[in-house]
Amino acid sequence: MDNLLPRLQATNRKAAKLERLLLRLKQEKEQLLEQVEELNQTLEVKEKAYLDMQEKYEALKLAKSIGTETGTYDKEAVQTMIEDYIKEIDICLKNFGD
Protein backbone atom coordinates (compact mmCIF):
# COMPACT_ATOMS: atom_id res chain seq x y z
CA MET A 1 0.00 0.00 0.00
CA ASP A 2 2.86 2.36 0.66
CA ASN A 3 3.94 1.96 -2.91
CA LEU A 4 0.48 2.72 -4.30
CA LEU A 5 0.37 6.46 -3.49
CA PRO A 6 3.66 7.37 -5.25
CA ARG A 7 2.66 5.30 -8.27
CA LEU A 8 -0.73 7.02 -8.38
CA GLN A 9 0.91 10.46 -8.17
CA ALA A 10 3.38 9.54 -10.93
CA THR A 11 0.50 8.32 -13.09
CA ASN A 12 -1.40 11.57 -12.47
CA ARG A 13 1.68 13.61 -13.45
CA LYS A 14 2.07 11.57 -16.63
CA ALA A 15 -1.63 11.99 -17.42
CA ALA A 16 -1.40 15.77 -16.89
CA LYS A 17 1.69 15.89 -19.10
CA LEU A 18 -0.14 13.93 -21.82
CA GLU A 19 -3.14 16.27 -21.58
CA ARG A 20 -0.86 19.30 -22.06
CA LEU A 21 0.80 17.58 -25.00
CA LEU A 22 -2.58 16.76 -26.53
CA LEU A 23 -3.72 20.38 -26.15
CA ARG A 24 -0.50 21.66 -27.73
CA LEU A 25 -0.85 19.22 -30.63
CA LYS A 26 -4.47 20.26 -31.21
CA GLN A 27 -3.42 23.91 -31.31
CA GLU A 28 -0.58 23.10 -33.69
CA LYS A 29 -2.98 21.17 -35.90
CA GLU A 30 -5.32 24.17 -36.07
CA GLN A 31 -2.44 26.46 -36.97
CA LEU A 32 -1.31 24.09 -39.69
CA LEU A 33 -4.83 23.80 -41.09
CA GLU A 34 -5.07 27.60 -41.23
CA GLN A 35 -1.69 27.74 -42.96
CA VAL A 36 -2.81 25.14 -45.51
CA GLU A 37 -5.96 27.17 -46.22
CA GLU A 38 -3.92 30.35 -46.72
CA LEU A 39 -1.52 28.53 -49.03
CA ASN A 40 -4.42 27.09 -51.04
CA GLN A 41 -5.86 30.57 -51.47
CA THR A 42 -2.48 31.92 -52.54
CA LEU A 43 -2.14 29.07 -55.01
CA GLU A 44 -5.56 29.83 -56.50
CA VAL A 45 -4.61 33.48 -56.98
CA LYS A 46 -1.29 32.55 -58.58
CA GLU A 47 -2.95 29.98 -60.87
CA LYS A 48 -5.50 32.57 -61.99
CA ALA A 49 -2.75 35.09 -62.67
CA TYR A 50 -0.82 32.45 -64.61
CA LEU A 51 -3.86 31.59 -66.74
CA ASP A 52 -4.50 35.28 -67.43
CA MET A 53 -0.89 35.74 -68.44
CA GLN A 54 -1.02 32.67 -70.64
CA GLU A 55 -4.14 33.99 -72.40
CA LYS A 56 -2.44 37.34 -73.01
CA TYR A 57 0.62 35.56 -74.35
CA GLU A 58 -1.48 33.47 -76.74
CA ALA A 59 -3.34 36.58 -77.92
CA LEU A 60 -0.05 38.40 -78.48
CA LYS A 61 1.38 35.42 -80.30
CA LEU A 62 -1.70 35.28 -82.52
CA ALA A 63 -1.53 39.01 -83.18
CA LYS A 64 2.12 38.74 -84.17
CA SER A 65 1.45 35.79 -86.45
CA ILE A 66 -1.28 37.74 -88.21
CA GLY A 67 0.90 40.83 -88.58
CA THR A 68 3.33 41.59 -91.36
CA GLU A 69 7.03 40.89 -91.35
CA THR A 70 7.67 44.24 -89.66
CA GLY A 71 5.42 43.27 -86.78
CA THR A 72 2.69 45.77 -87.58
CA TYR A 73 -0.80 44.77 -88.53
CA ASP A 74 -3.98 46.35 -89.74
CA LYS A 75 -6.65 46.22 -87.06
CA GLU A 76 -9.47 46.05 -89.59
CA ALA A 77 -7.77 43.22 -91.47
CA VAL A 78 -7.31 41.29 -88.25
CA GLN A 79 -10.95 41.88 -87.32
CA THR A 80 -12.03 40.63 -90.76
CA MET A 81 -9.86 37.52 -90.40
CA ILE A 82 -11.33 36.80 -86.98
CA GLU A 83 -14.87 37.21 -88.30
CA ASP A 84 -14.05 34.86 -91.19
CA TYR A 85 -12.71 32.28 -88.72
CA ILE A 86 -15.87 32.60 -86.64
CA LYS A 87 -18.02 32.07 -89.73
CA GLU A 88 -16.03 28.96 -90.63
CA ILE A 89 -16.37 27.64 -87.10
CA ASP A 90 -20.12 28.27 -87.17
CA ILE A 91 -20.42 26.40 -90.46
CA CYS A 92 -18.43 23.48 -89.04
CA LEU A 93 -20.57 23.38 -85.91
CA LYS A 94 -23.74 23.49 -87.98
CA ASN A 95 -22.52 20.64 -90.19
CA PHE A 96 -21.40 18.69 -87.15
CA GLY A 97 -24.90 18.87 -85.70
CA ASP A 98 -26.51 17.53 -88.86
Image: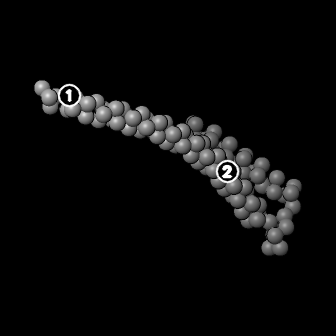
Q: Position of residue 65 (x, y in %)?
A: 73, 65
Q: Is residue 67 above or below residue 94?
A: below
Q: Which residue is at the front of the view, 39 or 60?
A: 39
Q: Is residue 7 above or below residue 77?
A: above
Q: Dot 1, how many residues are within 10 Å of its Cα: few (below 14), some (14-19), or many (20+)? A: few
| Numbered disc 1: secondary structure | helix
The residue lying toward the viewer, choosing from 75 and 61, is 61
x and y percentages locating residue 29 in the rendered image: 45, 38
Q: Which residue is more in the foreground, 37 or 91? A: 37
Which disc is residue 5 wearing?
1
Q: Residue furthest front?
A: 2
Decide if residue 91 is in sight here. Answer: yes
| Depicted 30 relative to depicted 76: above or below | above
Amino acid, disc 2: Ala
Locate the N terminus and report the quarter of the image it occupies. Answer: top left
Which numbered disc, 1 or 2, marks the residue closer to the eye?
Answer: 1
The quarter of the picture where the C terminus appears is top right
Residue at the image position 41 percent from the left and 38 percent from the top? 25
Measure the alpha-carbon separation of dots 1 and 2.
Answer: 66 Å
Q: Farthest residue to the bottom: give it.
A: 70
Disc 2: which residue: 49
Q: Quadrant of residue 58?
A: bottom right
